Image: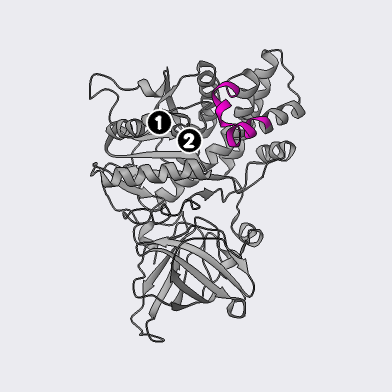
Amino acid sequence: VASIGVAAKMRQRQPSSAAIASSPRATSAREPREAAVASVVAIESGMYHRRRAHVHRGRARAALSRAAPPPLERLAEIAFASALERLRDAGLDPSLGRLASTVAALSDVYTRRRERIGRDSRGAEAIAARLAFYAPRDALKIDEVLEELDAAGALPRDGDRWRVLDVGAGVGASLAGVLVRAHVRGRPRAIEATAVDADPRALDAGAELLARFARESGVVLNLSTRISDVRRLRDPDPDAEAGFDLVLTANVLNELPRADRMPLLRDLLRRLAPDGLLLVLEPGLRETTRELMAMRDALVESGAPLHVAGPCTHARPCPMLPSPRDWCHARLRGRLPTRTASLARMAGLAEQGAAYAWLALRSVPGSVALLGSWRAVSEPLRAKGKTELWACGEPGLVRLRQLDRHRGSAADLAGLERGVLFDLEPDPSGPVQAGAQRARLTTRDADADPDDAR
């Protein structure tokens, strides 16, 4: 066990750094958004567990949660209005109470009665609920992941136009997230997108939503839709539908037979442009997340021409897979749009912190700033007299421990949230005790230039 002294201020949207004493194996990279910890912490290797500790969420969420981007607020309003219009046109009850009830029923199907997904998610009321609630919420997931990848230099080439393929597009949530990020970052200015789904009514609803939102976002959208089972995407021509800058597939793999999942991923990788990015999102349940983690390892071990861009900060086998109790998932850090949060309250669902799993693969290595950094893979865990947090990096899985008497006045481990990235950077000023050395903990703003990370 090596002692780590950390001195940093909890800040949001602003870079900060702090002197710490850390394991000699600590490495450095760049943090896209949150600030980090203060006072004395200990680090040790071992298996991730939650024994004799409870999750400390309130303070971290209060510190790190941020308002939804203005374009996402507008997307939520458009999606809500579209949902009510579709209910009225179908002669169905457009009341908020009925809509919230359908959202709650769908949530139960997605999390507990998963064998009913194909049947219960395609009716007119289900599509309206997906538009009103799930489209804005899932667009926020895409936006947050793209924001992190943008800060890490892992997005496709900058240019005026992206070619995007959305496999299992549904009601357009993933493409809406791309439009939100394009609007916020000011590029690309045009998106040529292909949306593929087996449900024609969902595709129609998504195309209408995306057309309305694109007109207001200022991003030119040229959208084509294709009704097809995603397992039938393969074409005899190996060059068909290739050259995409960004390929998306969200909440699709878990609904396919296990034997079809890896072939689909390999096929989607083949469709990338030379510097393209494949982004996969899955539900943040243990079973679905661990399946994605295992596919990530299998792809890396196969020697396929790909490079992991996130969420992993290393290319080694996932250190959480050996324990069946562990799964590496993220939580939304931003607040839901106002309209979406209101619907969540009525449906009895959480207004923030929704869990999901993601994997980003690049066709070329490029310069990805996540490599070498550390990621928090647990919530802060409170136990008697201390706070602990599990982190994953190049050395593997480690546990950070902070005694209450060493907590700083400005920030501490309890202020970190699952998914936060931080750096441990060697400092030549010398060791502070046997087996430890000086280092600096660095964080930075996601909107800052990657070259300004230090």
Q: Position of residue 68 (x, y in %)?
A: 59, 45
Quadrant (top left, top right, bottom left, bottom right) of the C terminus: bottom left
**What's the residue type where badge 2 is placed?**
Leu
Q: Is residue 378 placed above or below 246 in the rendered structure?
A: below
Q: Is residue 122 placed above or below 107 in the rendered structure?
A: above
Q: Quadrant of residue 124?
A: top right
Q: Position of residue 19 (x, y in %)?
A: 45, 77
Query: Can residue 415 be seen in this snapshot?
Result: yes
Describe the colour scheme in one phrase: one colour
Q: Are marks 2 and 1 in contact (CB under 8 Å)?
A: yes
Q: Which secondary structure, mark 1?
A: strand
- Comes first in the chain, label 2 or label 1: 2
Q: Nearer the viewer, residue 34 or 449?
A: 34
Which residue range is magenta in the image? Answer: 105-121
| Magenta-span inclusion, residue 112 | yes
Q: Nearer the viewer, residue 328 or 368?
A: 328
Mark linked to residue 179 = 2
Mark linked to residue 191 = 1
Q: Position of residue 392 (x, y in %)?
A: 42, 60
Q: Position of residue 445 (x, y in %)?
A: 47, 59
